[in-house]
Amino acid sequence: MQLSTYIKDLLYRYECVIIPGFGAFLANYTTASIDTESHTFYPPGKSISFNRQLQTNDGLLANYVASVEGTSYEKALEKIRSFTGKLSLQLMEGSIATLDGIGDFKLNPENSVAFTPSNAENFNTAAFGLTTFVSSEISRLQATGTSTTTVEEPFLFAPTKRSQPYLKYAAVGLIALALAGFVGMKMYEGNIEQHNFAEKQKATTVLEKQIQEATFVIDNPLPAIELALTKQTGSYHIVAGAFRMEENAATKIEQLQEKGFSATMIGVNKYGLHQVVYSSHTERLDALNALRTIKREENKDAWLLVKKLEE
């Protein structure tokens, strides 16, 4: 039967191959073994068993048949149904259904399907090329006069206890060195982790400071200028810059007011910088529209700050 070949191919790769509507072959790995009575050596392999309860189609066999024969999945299923029908008919007639290289099926007296696996195939790919072989019993020959007789001599092993105290001290020394190296490595790793954490904290602080630093840098700050600033309302502020010196912040406000912006200072941030804004808005949409215009026409580095001003 052609499907026997397909089933064998799948048993080399999978541990469960289901024949839809009939049952499933299960492959279990077995280790190498020796038959002491027959002196036969068996390589590692897979023992094949059959489970009549697993009949639900999992698509494995049908997809493999379709890919090998270059046909559709539906036609592959039809071929499998025809195959299982022939198997069932043979069993109903009391015949033995044989799958080459896999095993034989027959009905037992309880009218249940019995499976006898074949030993012709070794489905364990790791044991490829290994075969069963028989080794003759090893015996010792002892010559006496002109005749030769076979004498079985037991192998005796009498270990002698040697006193080598220096080995004990060497072992203790090696253990001490290993422990010292391990402790030293842990201390070194701990110092490295602390150093990396501290450097990471420094880098984070510097990065935050760079983000909040002034967009505009004004050299030679002018004397302080007193301005009559209007009180800003709203929680959405378009930031023009942040300045360490309050005089520079006041100069920037004057420059922006000359351009028509309702610029003002909204306080000092957590880094000690005086924040100057183009304008403040109560509605987020108005603030976004204004920010878009400012970034396009005035300052591409302007950004939106959402902050509720203190009364």
Image (cartoon, grey):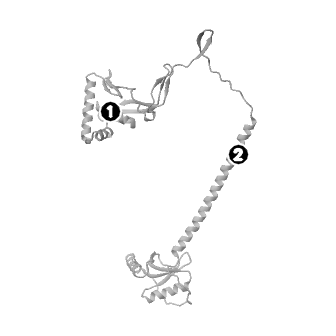
Q: Report the residue marked by disc 2.
A: 176
Residue 190 visible within the image: yes
Comparing 113 with 73, the one in front is: 73
Q: Which mark is residue 73?
A: none
Q: Is residue 184 above or below residue 11?
A: below
Comparing 308 with 141, the one in front is: 141
Name the element at disc 2. Answer: helix
| Residue sitting at x 72%, y 43% | 173
Rendering quarter of residue 57: top left
Q: What kind of residue is marked 2? A: Ala
Position of residue 143 measured from the top left corner of the image (x, y, whole percent): 61, 12
**Residue ranking furthest to the front:** 146
Q: Earlier in the sequence, mark 1 or mark 2?
A: 1
The N terminus, quarter of image? top left
Rendering quarter of residue 103: top left
Position of residue 278 measured from the top left corner of the image (x, y, whole percent): 44, 82
Name the element at disc 1. Answer: helix
Rendering quarter of residue 56: top left
Comparing 243 with 35, the one in front is: 35
Q: Which mark is residue 5?
A: 1
Q: Is residue 185 above or below residue 53?
A: below
10 Å crowding of disc 2: few (<14), some (14-19), many (20+)? few
| Residue sitting at x 59%, y 65% | 199
Q: What kind of residue is marked 1? A: Thr
Position of residue 265 measured from the top left corner of the image (x, y, whole percent): 50, 83
10 Å crowding of disc 1: few (<14), some (14-19), many (20+)? some
| Residue sitting at x 48%, y 86% | 253
Taking the image as shown, residue 77 lies to the left or right of residue 234, namely left
Badge nearest the viewer, 1 or 2? 1
Taking the image as shown, residue 264 lies to the left or right of residue 168, namely left
Residue 14 visible within the image: no
Position of residue 131 measured from the top left corner of the image (x, y, whole percent): 45, 28
